[in-house]
Amino acid sequence: MLNDAIHNVSIQGELYLLDAEDRVLFTTDQNHREGTIFTENTDVKEPYITRQMFTDQYIADWSVVTVVDESIYRAELSDSTKYILLLGLMNFILPAFLIIYLSRSFHSRLNNILDHTRHIEKKNFAEYPHVRSKDEIGQLANQINRMTRKMNELFNEVFKANLEKKELALREKEAQLSALQSQINPHFLFNALETIRMRSIMKDETETALMIENMAGIFRNSLKWGSNWVTVLDEVRLIQAFLEIQGYRFGERLTYHVYVDEQLADFEIPNLSFLPFVENASLHGIEPKKGTGNIDISITKTALGLRFVIEDDGVGIPESRLIRLQKELQDGATMGENVGIENIYYRLKLYYKDQFRMKIESEEGIGTTVTIDLPMQDSKLQAYLKVSD
């Protein structure tokens, strides 16, 4: 049993089993005989000797002595130290490189995003092009791109709206300039008309005086460019005055009917929105026609606002000219020969954006119909619906 136990011990040296008098009872040292006295003088160059005493009563004072060459331990320790240092360096250097790589990656990407936001600050709304990862920085870049796209959309909408507003304002100025170019000392002309009217009254020429009064009223209104908005009632009065003048001019060749919903009397519209169409119907529709002509005008209310319809049975508009006119209105071309219609269209577009509708229908030899739908302002819409109920 001792032999098996001792030979199963894993030790890089020699083992001795000694009795109380240090006689060798058993040893793994082939150079030491059993029964001899154990001495510490061995063939080992740097011996490291340990002794362990037994405490069992049957083998009291017996001991186990081991003799190991310390140089072997040091060599093994040196080898182990190298491996430990190598593993330590690997455990330190690899994570360090990984941390440095990740830090530089985060730092460089954050710097790129920061530079991109500086470009955005300078109104360069290009999208960030380096989105490849799905980590937090990638999500941040995607969010910046979504914000940039939204800013681009808003910027384009505002820019487009400003361009449209400036273009429409320019066209309104062109219309005003066209009117101003036709005004030669307007106050003098107005005073001259008033003088002629008074002279006609003094000579009992009441019909002539009435025509001059209507003419002066129209002329007075044309001078009020500062009044951009008028009521339907004021516009209808101008239309009535103009039609009376045309009736005086054409005699029995012209008949007309005007219908206005009373609830729309105070409805505000842009100044001179309807009168130019009445003028076109009279001068370009009825005047060239042989025989009697008729003009029907109706101003009615709809669910969202007002509808103006003027119909005449005049000579109509040639199809090619009507197509050209509609294309010019759609494309926003520079005002040409249809100054009145184009002026109204651009002014309505300035005030109502895309919320109004203008439709021109005509057939040569049959007549022309113009329909205009205008929305009601929010503050008046509720009152209108209440009256309708």
Image: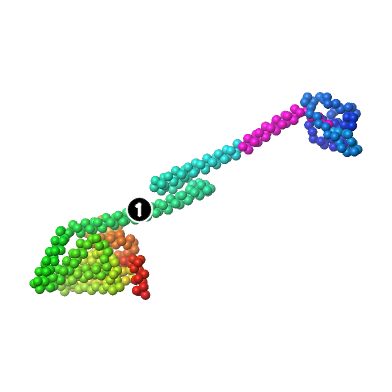
Between 6 and 51, the one nearer to me in the picture: 51
Q: Quadrant of the N terminus?
A: top right
Q: What residue does disc 1 label?
A: 159
Vertical arrangement, residue 255 with respect to residue 69, above or below? below
Vertical arrangement, residue 347 with respect to residue 96, above or below? below
Residue 354: image quadrant is bottom left
- The answer to whether one can see residue 358 in this image is yes
Vertical arrangement, residue 38 with respect to residue 353, above or below? above
Residue in the picture at 88% in, 34% down: 61
Q: Secondary structure at mark 1?
A: helix
Q: Residue 185, image x and y in percent?
A: 15, 59
Residue in the picture at 89% in, 32% down: 20
Q: Residue 251, image x and y in percent?
A: 15, 72
Q: Amino acid at mark 1?
A: Phe
**In the rendered view, does 157 fall on the left or right side of 135?**
left
Q: Residue 361, image x and y in percent?
A: 28, 67
Vertical arrangement, residue 294 with respect to residue 13, above or below? below
Category of crowding for the residue at label 1, using alpha-carbon neighbours closer than 10 angstroms: few (below 14), some (14–19), many (at least 20): few
**In the rendered view, does 304 fall on the left or right side of 209?**
right
Q: Which residues are magenta?
A: 65-92
Residue in the picture at 27% in, 64% down: 229
Residue 371: image quadrant is bottom left
